[in-house]
Amino acid sequence: MAKGTSSYSEYNALLQQIESNEIAPVYLLHGEEYYLLEQILEKIEKAVLEEATKSFNHQLFYGKETDVSDILNAAKRFPMMAEKQLIVYKEAQYCRTPDQIIPYLENPTPSTVLVWYHPGKNLPMNTRVGKKFKELAKVFTGSPVPERDINPVITQYIKDQGYDIEPKPLHLLIENSGAKFSVIIKELDKVFSNLEKGNKIREEHIEKYVGINKEYNIFALQKALAQKQKSRSIEILNYFLNNLNTNPMPMLNGALFSYFKKVAITQSMMRSTDREIMAAIGIPQFFINEYRQAATNFGGKKILKVIEALNDCDLKFKGIKESTGDQKGIFEETILKILSL
């Protein structure tokens, strides 16, 4: 019996359990953070399946195509020439009759490992089937890593991979990725594949292997906006608009939203010490003056209008709010609105 969690420490603990061959008969993997879910599933596959008999004992089913009765029939069979078999029910969020799995949860087959894979959103744990999973299965909830935790989590992840990183490139990596854990991990994979273990990741490594332009990047845009440098802001904006493959508009908007939320916090703490502000918003020493300047330049209700504009942009990108559908035009309009405040 286990409670769901999205913390990186609990994620690592679950991986260690699997690597130690502490395999549960049933797993529920659900939530938005695909990377964590995929890593756990991969570990389960390696732990349960023997290479020689893998093709006989690994069965995949999909929620849109398969009835729960088919899952039950497969799970109750014995493995072929192996100790265990693995049944993975992918896209379980599309299952029409999830309650039918409850009798199996109460009496699982010892030689079967069943993974109920429910990505994209959480299985409601207050439902009958949710309560049973919580009671009888190993549950992991892959929720997005909170922004306040992203710095220590990524630092620990880098150390786990055998590297170290300087504060500035770490901040650049996080800001450029919109503080999205899965995006940061994918970018780090590019660095790891080009850098031997034991090295310290520096700013030039992020620029070279992640592909962040040294002159035109999210840091440069944030700084230009913070200082209300209209011509410089538009210059960087035009670079982004002409290089959409490496600068997706929703990611840039997300990074700016995160930035100005921290500016708002800085504005509310202007009488606090630099150390107190740095601790509250999670920035290194060399950025504190920029944040204080932005808090001053967007004083009063201006900072609220900035955040409102960025949130409005996000809603239009997602199709929640009516728009032309032209992401370039929507983002350009948002930046110009911020510069007009």
Image: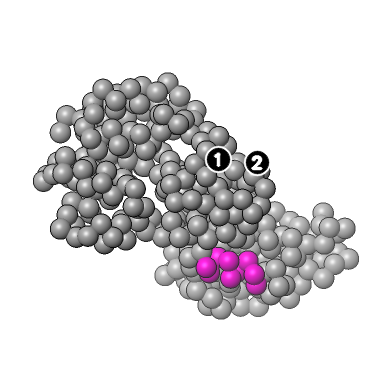
Specify the quadrant of the image occupied by residue 15. bottom right
Residue 139 or residue 264, whichever sits in front: 264
Q: Is residue 138 visible?
A: yes
**Figure quadrant of the N terminus:** bottom right
Q: Secondary structure at mark 1?
A: helix
Disc on res. 81: none
The residue drawn where x is 15% and y is 33% is: 341
Specify the quadrant of the image occupied by residue 124. bottom left
Q: Which residues are magenta?
A: 9-17
The residue drawn where x is 82% and y is 54% is: 55
How many numbered marks appear? 2
Distance from disc 1 to disc 2, alpha carbons, whole Å, reads 9 Å
Residue type at numbered disc 2:
Asn
Residue 172 or residue 89, whichever sits in front: 172
The residue drawn where x is 87% and y is 58% is: 52
Q: Earlier in the sequence, mark 1 or mark 2?
A: 2
The magenta stretch spans residue 285 = no
Q: Is residue 215 above or below residue 302?
A: above
Q: Tell whether 33 sits left or right of 215.
A: right
Say which residue label 1 marks. Answer: 205
Residue 241 or residue 4, whichever sits in front: 241
Q: Overall secondary structure of the magenta stretch?
A: helix
Residue 155 pos. (x, y %) = 50, 57
- Residue placed furthest toward the left: 300
Residue 146 pos. (x, y %) = 40, 58
Tag 1–tag 2 contact (CB < 8 Å): yes
Q: Tell whether 79 sits left or right of 133.
A: right
Q: Tell whether 272 sits left or right of 113.
A: left
Q: Is residue 308 visible?
A: no
Q: Secondary structure at mark 2?
A: loop
For label 1, the crowd category at 10 Å Cα-Cα, with few meaning under 14, some 14 to 19 and many 20 or more, is some
Say which residue label 2 marks. Answer: 194
